[in-house]
Amino acid sequence: MNAPATPKKVTLAARKTAKATKESGPLKLFDRDGLYLLVAVAGSKVWMLAYRFGDKQMTYKIGPYPQIDLDEARDLAHEKRQLLRAGINPRAADEQQKAKNIAAAESTLWATCEAWLEHREGSWALKTGKRARNFLERYVRDDLGKLPVGSVDAGMVFNLISDIAKGRTGKERRAAAPTSALAVRQMLGEVYRFAIGTGRASVNPVSMMKAGDAVKKPRTKNNRSLNPDQLKTLLIAIEGATLSVPVRAAVRLLFLTAVRTNELIGATWGEFDLDNALWTIVASRMKGRESHVVPLSTQAVALLRDLHKLTGKQEWVFPNARDASRHMGNTSLTSMFVRLGCTDEAWFRSHGARGTFSTWANENDFNRDWVEKQLAHVEKDSVRLAYNSARWLPQRRMMMQRWADTIDSLLAPQAQPQNDDAMHSQGALAQSAA
């Protein structure tokens, strides 16, 4: 009988030069205690450990050669043999560790943020959801987001919010830094409430600090409502200012419809039924996630028909001046009010048109339900909400026509100032506000 072949040793020379062929099949270069180097026909070389577990002969892949040298392979094989002595299968231990790693990745703050964003999807306007994701990606994902959600403490949150507020992260516009910081704090607070509710965390570190601890709050400038004299002054200034046709139409429609700024500038021509004087804003664009029907006054319809001649071939009613594939930006209207001198005591912005209408309607004893419905304020009572959705369109149409006629009456007897004179007229607005 022939003597059995002597096992090939895993010498340095053998490790470097060993090759397997189709005729020979894979080669095994043995070391000791079950450790060997497997040389594949394709040319790869891998450290393997042969062992018995229970009644079965098994192998464990330690790693590739030459990335793992002989000494490291021996150390790793020793660790696996220690598991065997403790009655643990190295393969099972790897699976358990893999599961732990996956669980750890899913329990990070950023993973929780992702889960919260998904949970909130459909419950807020698309722009709100996009803004929340952008803020969290910008300020949380690459820093605190990598930590386990339960390990983030109040000090870490304080440092993050403070750095944002002071413009230290390099990711914010310095002028808006305090506002951005407050927004991130609010979002993280909601994320942690969600984390506690879903068992991901037991403590909300955001609730342990007040906003004022980390952020010097910017001066609040409310979107105040205007009395008739102030409104008259502003309308005259707007009429006399040099504005593009879309911007002039947009600000007029803000007052004539009392919709939110985002609802206005994001309007598409497909939402309008001018023959029936109706504007239906789809639910996805509404803050309350309910579609909103806006009755249009004769003045609003006439304005829109004129505007249709200019922008009617495009999707957006108010296209962006630089890129017609997007709608007008919020800054277009904000810049207009700034140019007209609406600063300091005369501060006024687009959202103030809603308050101005509301004040007028309530002072003229219009039914509160009509006013609230026109402003698209969502009722907490779902039964009452359904009830509102089916009523008051004729009444609201009458109310909005009266409002439009009131606006016209404020302008009709006046000789309109021009350009710079219009801006100077804002002095009266400031004085009446004092």
Image (tube, rainbow, N blue to C red):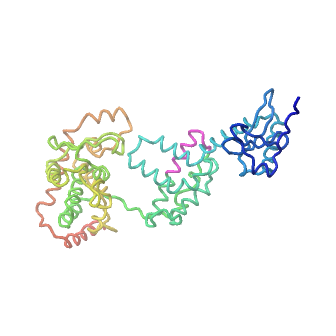
The residue segment tinted magenta is 187-202
Image quarter of the N terminus = top right
Instruction: Measuring from the top left, give residue 193's x and y in whole percent.
Output: 54, 44
* Snapshot quadrant of residue 31: top right
Residue at 33% over, 45% down:
285
Q: Is residue 298 magenta?
A: no
Left or right: residue 337 compared with residue 50 = left
Q: Is residue 204 above or below residue 427?
A: above
Instruction: Measuring from the top left, give residue 66's x and y in whole percent.
Output: 72, 51
Left or right: residue 27 compared with residue 386 = right
How many discs mark residues in the rendered view? 0
Instruction: Measuring from the top left, give residue 244's x and y in whole percent.
Output: 21, 62
Instruction: Measuring from the top left, give residue 91's x and y in whole percent.
Output: 73, 36
Camera-side residue of 137 and 160: 137
Q: Is residue 189 magenta?
A: yes
Camera-side residue of 422 and 361: 422
Camera-side residue of 380 and 56: 56
Residue at the outermost front position:
1
